[in-house]
Amino acid sequence: MPPQYLARIEATRPRLHKMAREQYGLELNPGPMGLSSRDALIGMKYAEAHGKGAKYHDAVFRAYWQHAQRIDDRSVLSDIAQSIGLDRQAFLSALDSENFEREVDADIEQAYLYGLNGVPALVFAGKYLISGAQPYDVLRQVVEKIEAENGSP
């Protein structure tokens, strides 16, 4: 990772920590920067295929952002998978699955098409991009806008 990019991330961390604390009641203790999240993303595809995508996502998020764990470590990821009810060995085998690799590649390609090149980034209803760590109210406003457009309460 280029030094200027790392410096920019470090410069925004106090704001991110403050927002997490004040908006969401979370204390952040992030893991090391510069990790490859590819195995974690492949693991997400496996978890989704087994109906446990949301649980896996939350557990990986907590592991990295609150417990400073290395989410590029397969043993950490397999512990997470097992903790949410997935078979450890099947999960580890899935990390080398070409099918799940292709699914991750397709997601990455879609992100590039959206113009995304960093995280966090959320796309709502296929047309509203929220980039960077944002307060809860910003996310709520986007959801309310989409509901109004769709005639939902």
Image (tube, helix red, strand yellow):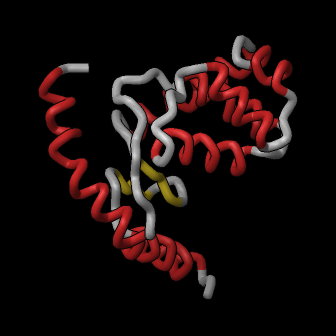
Whether 136 is drawn above or below 68: the answer is below
Q: Which percent across, then down, holds residue 4? A: 12, 27
x 19%, y 30%: residue: 5
Q: Nearer the viewer, residue 76 or 42?
A: 76
Q: Is residue 138 above or below residue 152?
A: above
In the image shown, does 81 or 44 lie closer to the viewer?
Answer: 81
Residue 23 spot, x, y in % from top left: 38, 72
Q: Number of marks in the image?
A: 0
State the quadrant of the C terminus.
bottom right
| Quadrant housing residue 87 | top right
The residue positioned 66% from the left and 21% from the top of the image is 75
* Residue 116 picture location, percent across and down: 37, 38
x, y percentage for residue 36? 46, 21
| Closer to the camera in the image, 120 or 56 | 56
- Residue lying furthest bottom in this view? 153
The residue at 32%/51% (across/down) is 132
Question: Which residue sits at x=50%, y=72%?
Answer: 143
Of residues 81 and 142, the one drawn nearer to the viewer in this rendering: 81
Looking at the rendering, in which quadrant would you find the N terminus?
A: top left
Q: Quadrant of residue 119?
A: top left
Q: Is residue 27 above or below residue 42?
A: below
Which of the 4 image quadrants contains residue 78? top right
